[in-house]
Amino acid sequence: MASGTLLYAQSGGVTAVINASASAVITEARARKIKVLAARNGILGALREDLIDTSKESAAAIRALAHTPGGAFGSCRVKLKSLEADRAKYERLLAVLKAHDVRYFLYNGGNDSADTAWKVSQLAQAFDYPLTCIGVPKTVDNDLAVTDTCPGFGSAAKYTAVSVREAALDVAAMAETSTKVFVYEAMGRHAGWLAAAAGLAGQSPDDAPHIILFPERAYDETQFLAQVKKVVDRVGWCVVVASEGIQHADGRFVADAGGGKDSFGHTQLGGVASYLAGRVKDQLGLKVHWTLPDYLQRSARHIASKTDWEQAQAVGKAAVQFALKGQNAVMPVIVRTSDAPFRWKIEAAPLSKVANHEKKFPPGFIRKDGYGITDKARTYLQPLIRGEAYPPYGTDGLPKYVALKNVAVKKKLPAWEG
Amino acid sequence: MASGTLLYAQSGGVTAVINASASAVITEARARKIKVLAARNGILGALREDLIDTSKESAAAIRALAHTPGGAFGSCRVKLKSLEADRAKYERLLAVLKAHDVRYFLYNGGNDSADTAWKVSQLAQAFDYPLTCIGVPKTVDNDLAVTDTCPGFGSAAKYTAVSVREAALDVAAMAETSTKVFVYEAMGRHAGWLAAAAGLAGQSPDDAPHIILFPERAYDETQFLAQVKKVVDRVGWCVVVASEGIQHADGRFVADAGGGKDSFGHTQLGGVASYLAGRVKDQLGLKVHWTLPDYLQRSARHIASKTDWEQAQAVGKAAVQFALKGQNAVMPVIVRTSDAPFRWKIEAAPLSKVANHEKKFPPGFIRKDGYGITDKARTYLQPLIRGEAYPPYGTDGLPKYVALKNVAVKKKLPAWEG
């Protein structure tokens, strides 16, 4: 083994391909004789000195990791604050890294993780501890700055486009005597990336989805219902894709109206699709169905995009390469060099340019009427869902996803009191 | 062309593979030089004399039909009543069949469709019109009598098991700091078939799904919440699969409580998963997410079961063969001849034995505690989700589903006044 250990951790919402990045990190590090530890449950494991020895995993297990969704080492939703506010935590983190001779810290996550990795690198410099910090990009929300796209997004986008196309065929077949309006709720928080991806399911105005509701456009109920009616009158049925983050003009989230209390005073969990379906039913009197795929859309490894899968592995591999070259405080980002044919490469971007920035959904991606995507959006989105990357299946008809052994490393420090 | 035309129609909720049956019907009929018409929107098209000439479709289109979800000719939710009550409709149907020299009537649907086909055959005999009526089985609800399973069910079952396994990996990775309970709502009306299929996703008691709620067992909220708490305490997280049809001991549907009015007096569309998630949140204070896949589960051709796909084609092919042999008033059913290795064959069952009967979910499939499936259930269910039958994809990353031309046949009768 070469001197110096690499610590890898996963952070934030997991995706269908974050483990593909992990697999690539471990594979590349093994090829270069670098020992890889993983933190259990992201930064929490690093703070608790709850570390996993990945050398206990077979080569076959690490290969299988590349087609296994979820987060194999556990992830977490924990954000470290500023160096000043959370100094004790950053110092503890550094102490753990030192105790295990960690010289490379790879943090696989979104904006917050890039920020954490960046701050750890600053602190290490201040303490004169030789540490190379790398952010590895990941998020279905596709909102990381600098990079062309974020691993995880393409697969969720493919799931969305395929599911909408399939459900639309169902609705079309049944519309005369059954459901006329179908509402699909897409993830994406305040950005319309995944809702826009649904737009790839159709080409012409009569193809589903007929209406996309973006969080970037104020939700106007009267106009929306009129649009649904128009589509049903023309096509006979209507598929609506709504982003979970759509808001009224005054900033209220539509999803907030979609919940409340039922007649027993119980919490009523709603959401955007449930709300919109209710309005269509009440106001237009049309039979309506709706779906909330929720986690299914971000964990659907079975319908992963090959582009996304390859990019997830590429950023993992590059992260190790950058680390070993001592390229501190950077993130391997995806640079698109050509749309047609689709070409891309990996470059190193400074974490300072990624952390605390957000890639906004381009206004030019939304059609003038506000209810669909433009050709520019198609040009951007289409290559990201291209290609299939099926997991292997067992004779039981289920994907062969791997469960790692996750053998704990012996602790060297007192328990963390944080 | 041989004398006598074959009329094919689709009925009830469509599935991921009903078009595979249609493709097999047309392919087999073409091989035997039989002309195939299809009714647009099921029995409605037959009554309206709104017929489609399938000879206008290319061989490639008919091949592509086998991997296209939805109902290519349109389906409908229309049930003909008894011969007495709906005599005028049955006679009109017969008139349309006669006008187009239809000698073979193939009706692809569930219980009601089997009943309709059976009644049409009786009426034809009474009128001395030589007609062979065949029911072709189909339904994700898996509730047809006699047949081992119903085409459409296996693919929805595979979707369910795969989706639950994938979402569970997501929840497991995030549970410490995020969602601890995930609720998945499965279709199936009053029977637990699809909910049971989710059970295939796990093997050991700590694998997801940890709790399955069957409509065949009364929903006891206190017990359910205690069970969720127990699982979360032991495993750290909990995946619940609930059938849409679960009921309280007094027969009230749980789904009915899951909707109501929001604070604006708007209809609140709920459902079982939304309701259960609300209870978990209110009573246990655990972070919860839920999914309602709705039509996605029955239209997901991208994750179709190969077994299901092959069976869907086999019943279509056999239907034509039975018809040409003059086996009137039968349905090609699937007979399982061996569990391991899984073997099956097609036989002809009298429609009278299928119509108006319902295959019940076997009590022996539910674990003693009521929250999981037995080995007997696994033995039955497992082969049905076996094998993958991917559709071809375009370079755009989307499945290449076919849209038929559906050229109308010239009408010969006065418009239907029904």
Image (cartoon, coloured by chain):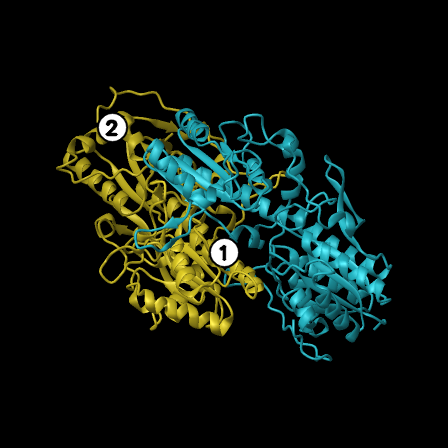
Chain colours: A cyan, B yellow
Extreme-left residue of the structure: B84
* Secondary structure type for disc 2: helix
Percent of width and height locating residue B159: 47, 53
What chain does badge 2 belong to? B
Instruction: Provide the residue designation for mark 2.
Output: B98
Q: Earlier in the sequence, mark 1 or mark 2?
A: 2
Percent of width and height locating residue A395: 52, 63
The image quadrant that residue A257 belongs to is top left
**Amino acid carrying mark 2 in the image:** Lys
| Quadrant where the image shows the N terminus of chain A | bottom right
Mark pair 1, 2: CA separation: 47 Å
**Amino acid carrying mark 1 in the image:** Ser
What chain does badge 1 belong to? B
Numbered mark located on residue B163 in the image: 1
- The residue positioned 34% from the left and 48% from the top of the image is B259
Mark 1 and mark 2 on one chain: yes
